[in-house]
Amino acid sequence: MEILCEKRLGQYPNNYQRVSNFQKVSKLQKKERAQQKLESESNRSKSEKEEDGHALSSEMRTKLSSKRVQNIHDVEFSRDQSNPKKRRSASIKKRRSEDDCFSNEFEEDEETMFLVKARSRKRIRNSDSVMTERNSDDAREKNYESRNGNMCTGSKERCSPINVKGNVEDRLKCHQCMKKKFVVVPCTKCKKKMYCIQCIKQWYPHLEEEEVSMLCPFCRRNCNCNVCLHSSGMIKTSKRDIPSHEKIHHLQYLICSLLPYLKQICEEQTKEMEIEANIQRKPYSEIEVQQTICYNDERIFCNHCATSIVDLHRSCPTCSYELCLSCCEEIRKESLTSRGKMKFQYINKGYDYMHGGDPLPESCLLKTSKEHVKSFIKWSANGDGSVTCAPKEIGGCGECVLELRRILPLGWISSLEIKAGNLLEMFRAQPTNFKHKCTGKSMKIFRRAASRVDCDDNDLYCPSSRDSLLEEERLHFQKCWTNGEPVIVRDVLEQTAGLSWEPMVIWRALCESVDLDISSKMSEMKAIDCLAGCEVEIKTREFFQGYMEGRTYYNFWPEMLKLKDWPPSNKFEDFLPRHCDEFIRALPFQEYTDPRSGLLNLAVKLPPGVLKPDLGPKTYIGYGLAKELGRGDSVTKLHCDMSDAVNILTHTAEVVLSDKQRSAIATLKERHRAQDWKERLDREESSCPTEKLVHSNGEDMEVLEIADMSKHPSDFDGKIEMSKSDIEGATCPGFSTEQETEETGGSALWDIFRREDVPQLEAYLRKHANEFRHTYCSPVEQVVHPIHDQSFYLTLEHKRKLKEEFGVEPWTFVQRLGEAVFIPAGCPHQVRNLKSCTKVAVDFVSPENVHECLRLTEEFRQLPINHKAREDKLEIKKMIIYAVDQAITDLEALVSTHN
């Protein structure tokens, strides 16, 4: 077997022409081959004449056969030297039949052949050790690596791709595809890994072959082969080692921040114990509370409000109906609110209706059931404070008196409070005093996001990821975070190894997953159609093709699809361990955000075995378009998360509209406007039948809408082209037009509202609810909670009206590739993709925003029974208790070691 090394031809910068250099075999080489042939024949004749009579071993036969084949090949090669052009074509034809990549990557002409002859080099013969290990694949691969390493280190030039001439078995194995190829690029650093040309172009387009030769993807820690993608622990996720004195400071700060909430929990339980003492007519100290059996892999929820039960609660001995302490208190105060059921269901009025046409005739005959049952059922406490089980109408038996039960050891929470107080008194710890002011910072680390009058929070803190490691920046982050302000961190992907976040790489990793249930389902997926607001089934390859190139309906209206929480599992770390490590490595302010070991992240303080909430990481992949469509945009509608969150934009792809699409969009927008105007007037006529506002004829309707558009600018949802001055007055300079979006290189448009503006925001949404559309593009007709319903997206026009009517303006900014957006708990927000985007997000619970988590928990428990946001998935009270306990344990251990 012989190896041919080639240099890159400088005359072909775009295409690397790979051709074989064929030279005439020297007389000395011919003589050596002839001698080897005679020796092999002689050895064979001797072995045949042995007295044993036994046959040659299979290993020797393989060696001899291989030598004979190679000698024959050498003879044929020497015969064809008289016609090098013909020999070259035959050789290429043979290799193309054995390897697919040659069919696409090798182009040759007369000029190339001339240059090859001029720059030709002698072939390098391999060592004789190759023949001794040919029966073992592992040994042969080891020999190839050793030989390639010697070749690379022996040359002062950059190592070139290796061409292998010989049998199919003699090809080199690519580390990426694990297939044997004729042309590979070996790494001069590790001298072990090598990558074929096809894999480099397909999976590492940002790397040139010379760069791979100098430092391969495996050495760069961003190899995305299947083996590496399913390997964890390849990188250190923590950016720095926190010294002991800093850990002590963080733990003191955590205990000091959580102690007030722990006291509230203790007071609530003490009050219930006093009521129980009155019911049993015993002293407080003699009260014994029976323990409820609760396994680590289950949660106990209140049957009435669906709030998670942490410790003390009341339970029915007959029907096991369980009630939280908050509901017990409301029953005693006779302030318990009914938890009715939502019965509203949107009707599919047809495809044409969603594009501005008429609804299907049969859909007009159907009536939507939008009744929100709020029937009040009398449920009051007894004179001694005891509570009877809930009436049968709402799930109880209505007979037995509820008994007090506990989950945790009796008195453990109160003793924890005392221990935490004593520890803080010993340290005399106080909350961190923020001495760093925004005015002392360079304006380069701030980004203009609002234009509110007489406000000092229009600029958002926007440090670089590298600066986030500094103590001064962490203190500034804490100041902004305590005030409930979002934070944008730039260049977070620069702190990583550069693993590819391209959706096809993630998909390939999932297809090769060890979990057969996941890998078998990867050929198809369920995506959300943003126009209809419902799920559609689509082949995975077609979805990602649309992600890169775009998709349209038959009328050329852009089809926007998105995936939420993909892959469909809460085990992102198990299925994509390498990407999970890469994401954690990219996280800024890891004291807060690290989902494994963040010192100030309450979510990681839960002990092993206790059921933990699913806080991520989670992947969100969706299409996007810079132009606001007004209907069917790729958006995450207005909502409010129960906890803090950080969202990193890891990959983007821009889709450019054709002139035909732009023309179709403009025409369809006119139909949408006419449909909005007509339906709005129809609703007004139904509410005021005596007033005739317009003609009922469809043609007259359209003419009236076009003629009077200038007179009713506020009645069109996102349809008005605004000047730049209007945009600056509405939100923030430079984030609202397609041209400005392209200039800033942004990919996702964010609107985050302040906590103090939530009441006015809710009032606006209730007032203008009929101007919004939701599922199947039907108008929103029922509002239970304007934010938690997740039925609204405020277009540019709605944000302008919101500021005019209520004086409310969000922080509006564009997220760029590689930026992390921090969203404080309690801040309503919405997002629109300006490009196809892949985002990865993780939730965390910071001590600064525990009060917001508690407030949201109280809001969610007031929602109807079947509301999608009602369940208490965070269990914030449980986090507070275990976080204080773990912080005390860690602090005592650090102090003893430090002393």
Image (cartoon, rainbow, N blue to C red):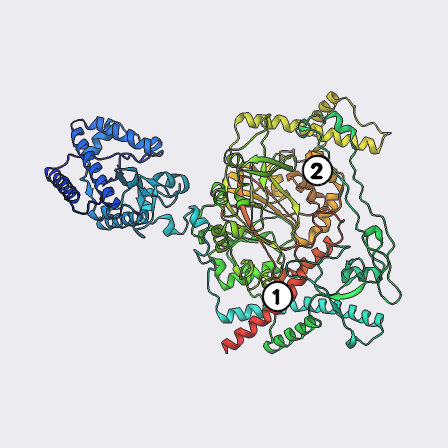
- One can see residue 491 in this view: no
Q: Residue at x 59, y 76 (%)?
A: 427
Q: Nearer the viewer, mark 2 or mark 1?
A: 1
Q: Residue at x 84, y 52 (%)?
A: 392
Q: Taking 136 as reference, is 72 left or right?
A: left
Q: Residue at x 80, y 28 (%)?
A: 693
Position of the N terminus, as image quadrant, is: top left
Answer with the quarter of the image where residue 98 lies.
top left
| Residue 772, numbered label | 2
Q: Which residue is mark 1?
A: 883
In the displayed structure, would residue 893 be above or below residue 301? below
Foreground of the two, 188 or 68: 68
Give the Cα distance between marks 2 and 1: 42 Å
Foreground of the two, 768 or 535: 535
* Residue 640 spot, x, y in % from top left: 66, 50
Q: Taking 570 as reference, is 15 left or right?
A: left
Badge 2 crowding class, 10 Å Cα cut-off, few under 14, some 14 to 19, many 20 or more, is many
* Residue 795 spot, x, y in % from top left: 65, 39
| Residue 538, numbered label | none
> Which sits earlier in the primary sequence, circle 2 or circle 1?
2
* Residue 549 spot, x, y in % from top left: 50, 33
Q: Amino acid at mark 1?
A: Ala
Q: Amino acid at mark 2?
A: Phe
- One can see residue 702 in this view: yes
Answer with the quarter of the image where residue 161 lies.
top left
Q: Secondary structure at mark 1?
A: helix
Count of picture labels: 2
In the displayed structure, would residue 483 be above or below residue 96? below
Q: Taking 484 as reference, is 697 left or right?
A: right
Q: Secondary structure at mark 2?
A: loop
Q: Residue furthest right?
A: 383
